[in-house]
Image: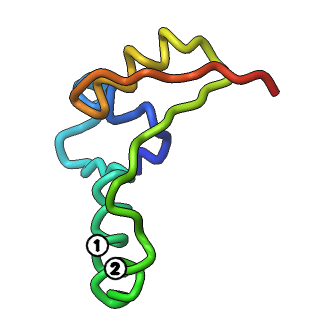
Amino acid sequence: MLACTHYPLMLQQIREYVPVQVKLLTQGEIVAESLQEYLQRHPEIDQQCGKNSRLQFFTTDDAADFDEKGSAFFGGPVKSTHVSM
């Protein structure tokens, strides 16, 4: 089970070193399916969700690095804001 958020970026490289008979599971697919099933069981949640939302990204790390890697996940430009903790 690949449960860390950066593993999907490395999935092809990981597959090169894992025996063929080993099935790799990624958390993204599992979480997405679970959320879809949950939302189908709880249609009232849809009424509580805003329809005119926007994505905001905050990082304690390097914002430019986050933007580059985040763009790979979202398939388009990502602009984050650096925050100090």
Tell me if residue 25 comes above or below residue 72 in the rendering: below
- Asked if one can make out residue 6 in the rendered structure from this viewpoint, the answer is yes
Residue shown at 41% from the left, 69% from the top: 49
* Residue situated in front as seen by the camera: 27 or 41: 41
Residue at disc 1, secondary structure = helix
- Can residue 15 be seen by looking at this rendering? no
The reply to whether callout 2 and callout 1 are in contact (CB within 8 Å) is yes
Q: In the rendering, at what x and y percent does residue 64 appear?
A: 49, 9
- The answer to whether 72 is drawn above or below residue 46 in the figure is above
Color style of the picture: rainbow
| Quarter of the view holding residue 37 | bottom left
Indicate whether 7 appears above or below 65: below
Work out whether 4 lies above or below 49: above
Seen from the viewer's position, the closer of residues 79 and 72 is 79
From the viewer's perspective, tell me whether residue 42 is left or right of residue 63: left
* Mark seen at residue 36: 1
In the picture, the disc for residue 55 is none
Q: Position of residue 40 (x, y in %)?
A: 28, 84
Q: Residue 25 location in percent, x, y? A: 31, 52
Identify which residue is drawn at 41% across, 45% down. 2
Badge 1: residue crowd in 10 Å (few <14, some 14–19, many ≥20): few
What amino acid is found at the position of numbered circle 2 in the picture?
Leu
Nearest the eye: 85 or 27: 85
Q: Distance between the residues labelled 2 and 1?
A: 5 Å
Q: Residue sitting at 59 percent across and 30 percent down?
A: 58
Asked which secondary structure carries label 2, the reply is helix
Q: Which residue is drawn at 38% across and 80% down?
A: 47
Q: x%, y% of residue 5?
A: 46, 38
Residue type, label 1: Gln
Q: Which mark is residue 39?
A: 2
